[in-house]
Image (cartoon, rainbow, N blue to C red):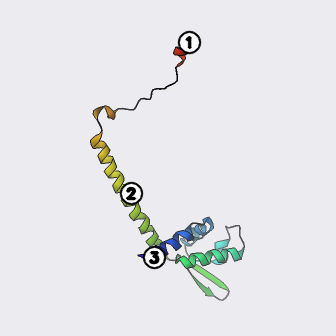
């Protein structure tokens, strides 16, 4: 469990940066060179390389060097593990919200079914003119 937690920490750390999320979005359409990943971003090639290294360390991205070109691709298994973790949390919360909704429906009194009326503590215009 500890290793899985550390892996998730690295994935969420990598996805915390908007520039890296742009890179992951681009890679979801297919492999791209580091230069291509940096095109939509206002940063130097050295900065792009550093971001790619963070993505590689998280396992989200793999890269392969051919000559002078480093081509990156997404690792769908790691992306699925993060997605699975999020889905489990969402299911847990939804179950609890369903139970809360059921409890509230059971305990609601018949007078609670109508819309709530709010009485203002401020005097209305007719009362002020008296």
Residue 120: give x, y in percent of width and height.
48, 26
**Residue 129: numbered disc:** 1
Q: CA distance from mark 3 to mark 2?
A: 25 Å
Select label 1 or label 3 by which is in front: 1
Q: Element at badge 3?
A: helix
Residue at mark 3: 77
Which residue sits at x=58%, y=79%?
A: 72
Residue 4: give x, y in percent of width and height.
44, 75
From the image, which quarter does the N terminus lie in? bottom left
* Label 3: how many Cα within 10 Å (few below 14, some 14–19, many 20+): few
Marks 1 and 3 in Cβ contact (< 8 Å): no
Q: CA distance from mark 1 to mark 3?
A: 72 Å
Give left or right: position of 88 versus 69: left
Give left or right: position of 60 versus 38: left
Which residue extends farthest top?
Answer: 130
Give left or right: position of 55 versus 99: right
């Amino acid at each position: 469990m500890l290793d899985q937690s550390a892996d998730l920490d690295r994935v969420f750390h990598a996805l915390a940066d908007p520039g890296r999320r742009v890179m992951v979005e681009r890679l979801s359409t297919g492999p791209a060179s580091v230069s291509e990943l940096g095109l939509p971003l206002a940063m130097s090639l050295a900065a792009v390389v550093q971001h790619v290294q963070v993505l590689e360390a998280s396992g989200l991205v793999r890269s392969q060097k051919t000559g002078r070109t480093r081509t990156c691709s997404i690792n769908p298994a790691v992306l699925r593990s993060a997605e699975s973790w999020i889905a489990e949390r969402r299911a847990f919360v939804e179950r609890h919200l369903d139970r809360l909704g059921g409890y509230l429906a059971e305990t609601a009194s018949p007078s609670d079914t109508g819309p709530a009326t709010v009485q203002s503590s401020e005097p209305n215009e007719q009362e002020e003119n008296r």
